[in-house]
Image (spheres, rainbow, N blue to C red):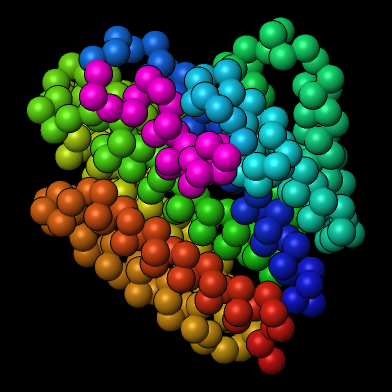
Amino acid sequence: MLSRTANHLYWMARYIERAETTARLLEVGGRNALMPDIGGGFRNDWEAILQANGTLEMFNDKYSDAVQRNIETFLFFDADNPSSVLSCMNMARENARVVRTALTSSVWDAINGAFQELKQFQRTERSKLELSDLTEWTLRSTALIRGCIETTQLRSDGYHFMGTGFGIERGDNTSRLLDVKYYVLLPNVSYIGSGLDQSQWVTLLRSMSAHRAFNWTYPGELSAAKIADFLILNRMFPRSLLSAISQTSGHLDHIGRVYGSVTPAQTKVHEILSELAEAQVKDIFDEGLHEFLMRFMRQNGELAHTVQETYLQGMPT
Protein backbone atom coordinates (compact mmCIF):
# COMPACT_ATOMS: atom_id res chain seq x y z
CA MET A 1 0.00 0.00 0.00
CA LEU A 2 1.23 3.50 -0.80
CA SER A 3 2.29 5.46 2.27
CA ARG A 4 -0.03 8.28 1.14
CA THR A 5 -3.05 5.98 1.23
CA ALA A 6 -2.01 4.49 4.57
CA ASN A 7 -1.56 7.99 5.98
CA HIS A 8 -5.08 9.08 5.01
CA LEU A 9 -6.67 5.91 6.43
CA TYR A 10 -4.69 6.23 9.66
CA TRP A 11 -5.63 9.87 10.17
CA MET A 12 -9.24 9.31 9.16
CA ALA A 13 -9.49 6.85 12.04
CA ARG A 14 -7.73 9.16 14.48
CA TYR A 15 -10.05 12.06 13.69
CA ILE A 16 -13.15 9.88 14.08
CA GLU A 17 -11.96 8.71 17.49
CA ARG A 18 -10.99 12.27 18.47
CA ALA A 19 -14.45 13.59 17.59
CA GLU A 20 -15.99 10.98 19.86
CA THR A 21 -13.69 11.87 22.73
CA THR A 22 -14.43 15.59 22.43
CA ALA A 23 -18.11 14.70 22.68
CA ARG A 24 -17.40 12.57 25.75
CA LEU A 25 -15.49 15.45 27.35
CA LEU A 26 -18.47 17.72 26.70
CA GLU A 27 -20.71 15.13 28.31
CA VAL A 28 -18.47 15.02 31.39
CA GLY A 29 -18.60 18.81 31.61
CA GLY A 30 -22.36 18.91 31.20
CA ARG A 31 -22.96 16.30 33.89
CA ASN A 32 -20.55 17.90 36.35
CA ALA A 33 -22.06 21.33 35.79
CA LEU A 34 -25.24 19.95 37.37
CA MET A 35 -23.42 19.08 40.60
CA PRO A 36 -23.45 21.52 43.53
CA ASP A 37 -20.56 23.98 43.56
CA ILE A 38 -18.38 23.43 46.60
CA GLY A 39 -15.68 25.78 45.39
CA GLY A 40 -11.95 25.50 45.06
CA GLY A 41 -11.65 23.71 41.74
CA PHE A 42 -12.14 23.97 38.03
CA ARG A 43 -15.27 21.86 37.91
CA ASN A 44 -18.04 24.37 37.35
CA ASP A 45 -16.16 26.85 35.18
CA TRP A 46 -15.40 24.17 32.57
CA GLU A 47 -11.70 24.97 32.37
CA ALA A 48 -10.93 21.38 33.34
CA ILE A 49 -12.40 20.16 30.07
CA LEU A 50 -10.34 22.61 28.02
CA GLN A 51 -7.22 21.71 29.98
CA ALA A 52 -7.70 18.01 29.28
CA ASN A 53 -8.47 18.74 25.63
CA GLY A 54 -5.25 20.73 25.33
CA THR A 55 -7.09 23.81 24.07
CA LEU A 56 -7.33 26.09 27.12
CA GLU A 57 -4.87 28.66 25.78
CA MET A 58 -6.52 28.68 22.36
CA PHE A 59 -9.93 29.18 23.96
CA ASN A 60 -8.71 32.05 26.12
CA ASP A 61 -7.26 33.78 23.06
CA LYS A 62 -10.63 33.73 21.31
CA TYR A 63 -13.31 33.92 24.01
CA SER A 64 -13.56 36.31 26.92
CA ASP A 65 -15.49 34.10 29.34
CA ALA A 66 -15.07 30.39 30.12
CA VAL A 67 -18.80 29.83 30.44
CA GLN A 68 -20.63 26.71 29.38
CA ARG A 69 -22.20 28.14 26.21
CA ASN A 70 -18.87 29.42 24.87
CA ILE A 71 -17.11 26.15 25.63
CA GLU A 72 -19.85 24.09 24.01
CA THR A 73 -19.54 26.22 20.87
CA PHE A 74 -15.74 26.05 20.93
CA LEU A 75 -15.57 22.27 21.38
CA PHE A 76 -18.37 21.36 19.01
CA PHE A 77 -18.75 23.96 16.26
CA ASP A 78 -15.59 26.08 16.17
CA ALA A 79 -13.78 25.48 12.88
CA ASP A 80 -10.68 27.25 14.25
CA ASN A 81 -10.35 24.61 16.96
CA PRO A 82 -8.70 21.53 15.40
CA SER A 83 -10.10 19.33 18.18
CA SER A 84 -13.73 20.43 17.85
CA VAL A 85 -16.24 17.83 16.71
CA LEU A 86 -16.84 19.87 13.56
CA SER A 87 -13.14 20.06 12.68
CA CYS A 88 -12.53 16.39 13.43
CA MET A 89 -15.48 15.17 11.37
CA ASN A 90 -14.52 17.49 8.51
CA MET A 91 -10.95 16.19 8.54
CA ALA A 92 -12.12 12.58 8.80
CA ARG A 93 -14.36 13.10 5.79
CA GLU A 94 -11.61 14.84 3.80
CA ASN A 95 -9.13 12.04 4.47
CA ALA A 96 -11.79 9.49 3.52
CA ARG A 97 -12.63 11.39 0.31
CA VAL A 98 -9.01 11.32 -0.85
CA VAL A 99 -8.85 7.51 -0.49
CA ARG A 100 -12.50 6.78 -1.21
CA THR A 101 -11.61 3.82 -3.44
CA ALA A 102 -9.88 2.16 -0.46
CA LEU A 103 -13.14 2.25 1.53
CA THR A 104 -16.32 0.26 1.09
CA SER A 105 -19.42 2.17 0.05
CA SER A 106 -20.91 1.53 3.50
CA VAL A 107 -17.98 3.20 5.26
CA TRP A 108 -17.98 6.16 2.89
CA ASP A 109 -21.76 6.60 3.17
CA ALA A 110 -21.55 6.57 6.98
CA ILE A 111 -18.79 9.20 7.01
CA ASN A 112 -20.35 11.39 4.35
CA GLY A 113 -23.79 11.05 5.93
CA ALA A 114 -22.44 12.27 9.27
CA PHE A 115 -20.76 15.18 7.48
CA GLN A 116 -24.06 16.20 5.86
CA GLU A 117 -25.96 15.92 9.15
CA LEU A 118 -23.35 18.08 10.83
CA LYS A 119 -23.92 20.77 8.20
CA GLN A 120 -27.60 20.68 9.13
CA PHE A 121 -26.67 21.28 12.77
CA GLN A 122 -24.63 24.30 11.68
CA ARG A 123 -27.69 25.77 9.98
CA THR A 124 -29.88 25.23 13.04
CA GLU A 125 -30.37 28.04 15.53
CA ARG A 126 -28.01 27.37 18.42
CA SER A 127 -30.70 27.88 21.07
CA LYS A 128 -32.63 24.93 19.63
CA LEU A 129 -29.73 22.50 20.10
CA GLU A 130 -29.27 20.77 23.44
CA LEU A 131 -25.79 19.66 24.45
CA SER A 132 -27.06 16.13 25.07
CA ASP A 133 -28.45 15.96 21.52
CA LEU A 134 -25.09 16.97 20.06
CA THR A 135 -23.04 14.53 22.12
CA GLU A 136 -25.44 11.64 21.54
CA TRP A 137 -25.42 12.32 17.79
CA THR A 138 -21.62 12.26 17.77
CA LEU A 139 -21.43 8.96 19.64
CA ARG A 140 -24.02 7.36 17.36
CA SER A 141 -22.34 8.62 14.19
CA THR A 142 -18.84 7.49 15.14
CA ALA A 143 -20.18 4.12 16.30
CA LEU A 144 -21.91 3.65 12.94
CA ILE A 145 -18.71 4.44 11.05
CA ARG A 146 -16.68 2.00 13.13
CA GLY A 147 -19.38 -0.63 12.75
CA CYS A 148 -19.26 -0.29 8.98
CA ILE A 149 -15.47 -0.59 9.04
CA GLU A 150 -15.62 -3.74 11.17
CA THR A 151 -18.34 -5.43 9.12
CA THR A 152 -17.42 -4.48 5.54
CA GLN A 153 -13.69 -3.71 5.18
CA LEU A 154 -11.26 -6.38 4.03
CA ARG A 155 -8.69 -7.30 6.67
CA SER A 156 -5.94 -5.89 4.47
CA ASP A 157 -3.12 -3.59 5.53
CA GLY A 158 -5.48 -0.63 5.04
CA TYR A 159 -7.79 -2.02 7.71
CA HIS A 160 -4.85 -2.42 10.07
CA PHE A 161 -3.66 1.15 9.50
CA MET A 162 -7.14 2.31 10.47
CA GLY A 163 -7.02 0.06 13.52
CA THR A 164 -3.63 1.49 14.48
CA GLY A 165 -5.06 5.00 14.27
CA PHE A 166 -8.08 4.10 16.38
CA GLY A 167 -5.90 2.39 19.00
CA ILE A 168 -3.34 5.18 19.39
CA GLU A 169 -6.00 7.87 19.57
CA ARG A 170 -8.12 5.89 22.02
CA GLY A 171 -5.19 5.37 24.37
CA ASP A 172 -4.50 9.09 24.42
CA ASN A 173 -8.15 9.96 24.89
CA THR A 174 -8.85 7.52 27.73
CA SER A 175 -5.84 8.85 29.61
CA ARG A 176 -7.08 12.43 29.13
CA LEU A 177 -10.57 11.58 30.37
CA LEU A 178 -9.07 9.91 33.45
CA ASP A 179 -6.81 12.86 34.07
CA VAL A 180 -9.75 15.27 34.01
CA LYS A 181 -11.34 13.38 36.86
CA TYR A 182 -8.50 12.79 39.22
CA TYR A 183 -6.15 15.69 38.68
CA VAL A 184 -8.44 18.55 37.66
CA LEU A 185 -12.08 18.00 38.56
CA LEU A 186 -11.57 17.18 42.21
CA PRO A 187 -11.04 20.56 43.88
CA ASN A 188 -9.12 19.40 46.93
CA VAL A 189 -7.53 16.18 48.17
CA SER A 190 -9.81 16.35 51.20
CA TYR A 191 -12.73 15.40 48.93
CA ILE A 192 -11.17 12.06 47.95
CA GLY A 193 -13.57 9.33 49.02
CA SER A 194 -16.41 11.81 49.55
CA GLY A 195 -19.81 11.81 47.90
CA LEU A 196 -18.51 14.31 45.34
CA ASP A 197 -15.59 12.04 44.54
CA GLN A 198 -17.90 9.04 44.06
CA SER A 199 -20.30 11.04 41.87
CA GLN A 200 -17.49 12.19 39.63
CA TRP A 201 -16.20 8.64 39.19
CA VAL A 202 -19.69 7.50 38.19
CA THR A 203 -19.93 10.43 35.76
CA LEU A 204 -16.62 9.40 34.22
CA LEU A 205 -17.78 5.80 33.80
CA ARG A 206 -21.04 6.91 32.20
CA SER A 207 -19.26 9.29 29.83
CA MET A 208 -17.15 6.37 28.61
CA SER A 209 -20.18 4.06 28.28
CA ALA A 210 -18.51 1.94 30.94
CA HIS A 211 -20.82 2.08 33.95
CA ARG A 212 -22.64 -1.20 33.37
CA ALA A 213 -19.51 -3.03 32.23
CA PHE A 214 -17.73 -1.85 35.38
CA ASN A 215 -20.54 -3.13 37.59
CA TRP A 216 -20.43 -6.50 35.85
CA THR A 217 -16.68 -6.70 36.46
CA TYR A 218 -16.51 -5.19 39.96
CA PRO A 219 -19.78 -5.77 41.82
CA GLY A 220 -20.12 -4.10 45.18
CA GLU A 221 -18.71 -0.86 46.48
CA LEU A 222 -17.24 1.59 43.99
CA SER A 223 -13.70 2.82 44.63
CA ALA A 224 -11.07 4.88 42.84
CA ALA A 225 -8.69 1.91 42.78
CA LYS A 226 -11.27 -0.37 41.14
CA ILE A 227 -12.17 2.21 38.51
CA ALA A 228 -8.53 2.99 37.73
CA ASP A 229 -7.82 -0.73 37.43
CA PHE A 230 -10.80 -1.11 35.08
CA LEU A 231 -9.97 1.87 32.85
CA ILE A 232 -6.22 1.25 32.76
CA LEU A 233 -5.48 -2.45 33.19
CA ASN A 234 -8.61 -4.42 32.27
CA ARG A 235 -8.04 -6.32 29.03
CA MET A 236 -11.75 -6.97 28.45
CA PHE A 237 -12.88 -3.34 28.45
CA PRO A 238 -12.24 -1.96 24.94
CA ARG A 239 -11.51 1.59 26.08
CA SER A 240 -8.93 0.69 28.74
CA LEU A 241 -5.33 1.73 28.17
CA LEU A 242 -4.17 -1.89 28.11
CA SER A 243 -6.86 -2.83 25.61
CA ALA A 244 -6.05 0.14 23.36
CA ILE A 245 -2.33 -0.66 23.35
CA SER A 246 -3.05 -4.37 22.79
CA GLN A 247 -5.19 -3.43 19.81
CA THR A 248 -2.48 -1.18 18.42
CA SER A 249 0.13 -3.88 18.94
CA GLY A 250 -1.97 -6.46 17.11
CA HIS A 251 -2.48 -4.20 14.11
CA LEU A 252 1.19 -3.20 13.92
CA ASP A 253 2.28 -6.83 14.20
CA HIS A 254 0.00 -7.71 11.29
CA ILE A 255 1.45 -4.88 9.20
CA GLY A 256 4.95 -6.06 10.11
CA ARG A 257 4.13 -9.57 8.90
CA VAL A 258 2.74 -8.20 5.63
CA TYR A 259 5.97 -6.35 4.91
CA GLY A 260 8.22 -9.04 6.35
CA SER A 261 10.07 -6.95 8.91
CA VAL A 262 10.08 -5.98 12.57
CA THR A 263 9.92 -2.20 12.73
CA PRO A 264 10.74 0.40 15.40
CA ALA A 265 6.99 0.99 15.76
CA GLN A 266 6.50 -2.65 16.79
CA THR A 267 9.40 -2.47 19.22
CA LYS A 268 7.96 0.67 20.81
CA VAL A 269 4.43 -0.67 21.18
CA HIS A 270 5.72 -3.94 22.64
CA GLU A 271 7.63 -1.97 25.30
CA ILE A 272 4.51 -0.04 26.33
CA LEU A 273 2.37 -3.18 26.26
CA SER A 274 4.84 -5.12 28.41
CA GLU A 275 4.91 -2.38 31.03
CA LEU A 276 1.12 -2.09 31.18
CA ALA A 277 0.62 -5.86 31.29
CA GLU A 278 2.86 -6.12 34.36
CA ALA A 279 1.52 -3.02 36.13
CA GLN A 280 -0.51 -3.17 39.33
CA VAL A 281 -2.98 -0.49 40.33
CA LYS A 282 -1.16 -0.03 43.65
CA ASP A 283 2.03 0.86 41.80
CA ILE A 284 0.10 3.37 39.68
CA PHE A 285 -1.29 5.14 42.74
CA ASP A 286 2.12 5.03 44.43
CA GLU A 287 3.57 6.83 41.42
CA GLY A 288 0.59 9.19 41.32
CA LEU A 289 -2.29 8.71 38.90
CA HIS A 290 -1.70 12.04 37.18
CA GLU A 291 2.03 11.35 36.84
CA PHE A 292 1.36 7.87 35.47
CA LEU A 293 -1.14 9.20 32.93
CA MET A 294 1.19 11.98 31.79
CA ARG A 295 3.97 9.44 31.31
CA PHE A 296 1.63 7.19 29.32
CA MET A 297 0.60 10.12 27.12
CA ARG A 298 4.25 10.85 26.38
CA GLN A 299 4.92 7.20 25.52
CA ASN A 300 1.82 7.02 23.35
CA GLY A 301 2.83 10.23 21.60
CA GLU A 302 6.28 8.79 20.93
CA LEU A 303 4.62 5.69 19.50
CA ALA A 304 2.48 7.82 17.19
CA HIS A 305 5.60 9.66 16.02
CA THR A 306 7.39 6.36 15.38
CA VAL A 307 4.42 5.01 13.39
CA GLN A 308 4.41 8.19 11.32
CA GLU A 309 8.12 7.92 10.58
CA THR A 310 8.11 4.18 9.98
CA TYR A 311 5.07 3.74 7.77
CA LEU A 312 3.50 7.00 6.72
CA GLN A 313 6.54 8.78 5.29
CA GLY A 314 7.58 5.89 3.08
CA MET A 315 6.61 2.26 3.57
CA PRO A 316 9.16 -0.37 4.63
CA THR A 317 10.51 -2.50 1.80
Indicate the quadrant containing the C terminus: top left, top right, bottom left or bottom right. Answer: bottom right
**In the rendered image, which quarter is residue 192 located in?**
top left
Q: Which residues are magenta?
A: 39-61
Q: Which residue lies at the image location 49% right of the left edge and 83% below the top edge? A: 264
Q: Which residue lies at the image location 79% right of the left edge and 68% below the top edge? A: 5
Q: Which residue lies at the image location 41% right of the left edge and 16% below the top edge? A: 33
Residue 201 visible here: no
**In the rendered image, which quarter is residue 72 located in?**
top right
Q: Magenta: predominant secondary structure element?
A: helix
Looking at this view, is 97 or 217 the one in front?
97
Where is residue 232? Give x, y as percent: 31, 49
Q: Which residue lies at the image location 53% right of the left edge and 37% below the top edge? A: 60
Residue 37 lies left or right of residue 10; in this view the side is left
Residue 208 lies left or right of residue 123; in this view the side is left
Residue 199 visible here: yes
Where is residue 36? Give x, y as percent: 30, 10
Q: Is residue 245 above or below residue 1?
A: above
Can residue 187 be found in the magenta stretch?
no
Where is residue 203? Give x, y as percent: 36, 23
Q: Is residue 264 above or below residue 21?
A: below
Where is residue 160? Give x, y as percent: 63, 64
Indicate the quadrant containing the N terminus: top left, top right, bottom left or bottom right. Answer: bottom right
